[in-house]
Image (spheres, rainbow, N blue to C red):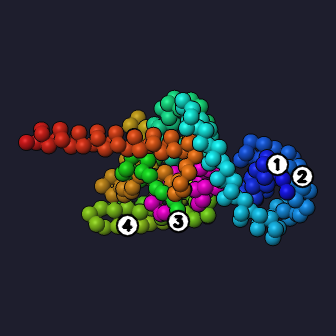
């Protein structure tokens, strides 16, 4: 039995996305075209691959059996076709990254322009979202996350600054009205601007100084979605609406221009920088391979600069 490979790609796309609209968004196609391709595939195969209702699209038993064998095969086909890239002057293709909004704002701006200039035939698609549970959702090739929690067959590569801090700040007008806290526990008496994960959890604020750890659950009038609405939280803090805790680099411009004043600096907790996560597989798509090599080059350059500075400091001390 022969089946057009384009129809197989459509079936796989719908199965991965769990629906026609989502598959159309991921693939850049349209839902009606994908639906027609799946219908034609089912007609040629003589079986129904999906249960369709007005709300859901789910694989049938035979559809699941087909996907178990078909998805690895399609991955191998894509990898085989990608070998053509080895014979090009520059790598080509599409690279899709799934990243938290913070990484899109704080990590990628220093990397993406140079990467795109170096590889003009690579198209980069960045999916930035606050719900960052699945690195490889929506057909993404790799993702950026802030903790090295490895799943099976996944590699983590450091990307960006290796040490970061959470900063706490408020506007001068807020502090003039409400006073300046001297200990994290005093934040319980202040209006604090909080964030909520997509899961619904509002995280505690954590502080650390000389081995002492303080965790509090502050209160305030404004709660924003972590990632998607952080700029609103910053704007509200600048306007005097309360105290904010956020990545130091995100708040730095407002701290430097005086719109916000730092609070409780000796207590600011630090954490490790983010990682680029990608599958541990033998045939890595060429655009992803190019990005991995680019990040490794940047990491090596940063390490060399750090070693050079340390050598200079040692020489000046001696």
Mark nearer the viewer, 1 or 4: 1
The residue singled out by tag 3 in the image is: 152
SS of the residue under disc 3:
loop
- Residue 202 in the image: state x and y as whole percent: 55, 63
Magenta span main SS? loop
Q: Count residues near mark 1 (Cα–Cα under 10 Å), then give few for <14, some for 14-19, many for 20+.
A: few
Quadrant of the image for the C terminus? top left
Residue at 89% over, 52% down:
40
Q: Is residue 99 visible to us here?
A: no
Looking at the image, tell me whether mark 4 or mark 3 is earlier in sequence order.
Answer: 3
The residue at 33%/52% (across/down) is 265
**How far is disc 3 from disc 1 in space, using C-alphas?**
33 Å
Observer-nearest of 185 and 6: 6
Q: Are marks 2 and 1 in contact (CB under 8 Å)?
A: yes
Q: Secondary structure at mark 2?
A: helix
Provide the residue designation for mark 2.
40
Residue 188 lies, in percent from the top left, at 45, 63
**Residue 214: mark in rendering:** 4
Magenta range: 128-151
Q: Earlier in the sequence, mark 1 or mark 4?
A: 1
Residue nearer the viewer, 106 or 15: 15
Q: Residue furthest bottom?
A: 61
Q: Are discs 4 and 3 less than 8 Å apart at CB?
A: no
In three-dimensional space, the C-alpha distance between marks 1 and 4, rounded to whole angstroms, equals 61 Å
Q: Which residue is mark 1?
A: 4
């Amino acid at each position: 039995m022969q089946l057009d490979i384009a129809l197989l790609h459509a079936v796989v796309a719908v199965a991965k996305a769990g629906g026609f609209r989502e598959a159309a968004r991921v693939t850049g196609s349209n839902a009606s075209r994908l639906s027609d391709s799946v219908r034609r595939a089912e007609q040629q195969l003589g079986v129904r691959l999906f249960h369709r209702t007005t709300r859901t699209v789910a694989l049938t038993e035979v559809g699941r059996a087909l996907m178990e064998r078909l998805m690895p095969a399609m991955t191998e086909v894509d990898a085989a076709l990608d070998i053509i890239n080895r014979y090009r002057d520059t790598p080509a293709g599409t690279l899709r990254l799934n990243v938290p909004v913070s990484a899109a704002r704080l990590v990628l701006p220093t990397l993406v322009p140079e990467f795109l200039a170096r590889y003009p035939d690579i198209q980069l698609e960045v999916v930035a979202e606050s719900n960052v549970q699945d690195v490889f959702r929506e057909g993404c090739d790799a993702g950026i996350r802030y903790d090295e929690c490895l799943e099976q067959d996944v590699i983590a590569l450091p990307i960006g600054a290796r040490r970061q801090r959470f900063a706490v700040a408020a506007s001068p007008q807020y502090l003039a009205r409400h006073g300046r806290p001297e200990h994290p526990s005093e934040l319980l008496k202040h209006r604090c601007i909080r964030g909520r994960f997509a899961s619904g959890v509002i995280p505690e604020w954590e502080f650390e100084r000389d081995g002492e750890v303080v965790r509090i659950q502050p209160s305030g009038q404004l709660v924003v979605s972590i990632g998607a609405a952080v700029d609103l939280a910053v704007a509200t803090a600048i306007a005097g609406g309360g105290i904010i805790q956020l990545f130091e680099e995100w708040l730095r411009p407002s701290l430097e221009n005086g719109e916000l004043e730092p609070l409780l600096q000796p207590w600011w907790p630090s954490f490790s920088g983010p990682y680029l996560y990608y599958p541990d597989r033998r045939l890595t798509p060429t655009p992803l391979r190019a990005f991995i090599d680019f990040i490794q080059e940047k990491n090596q350059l940063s390490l060399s600069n750090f070693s050079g500075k340390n050598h200079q400091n040692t020489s000046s001390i001696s």
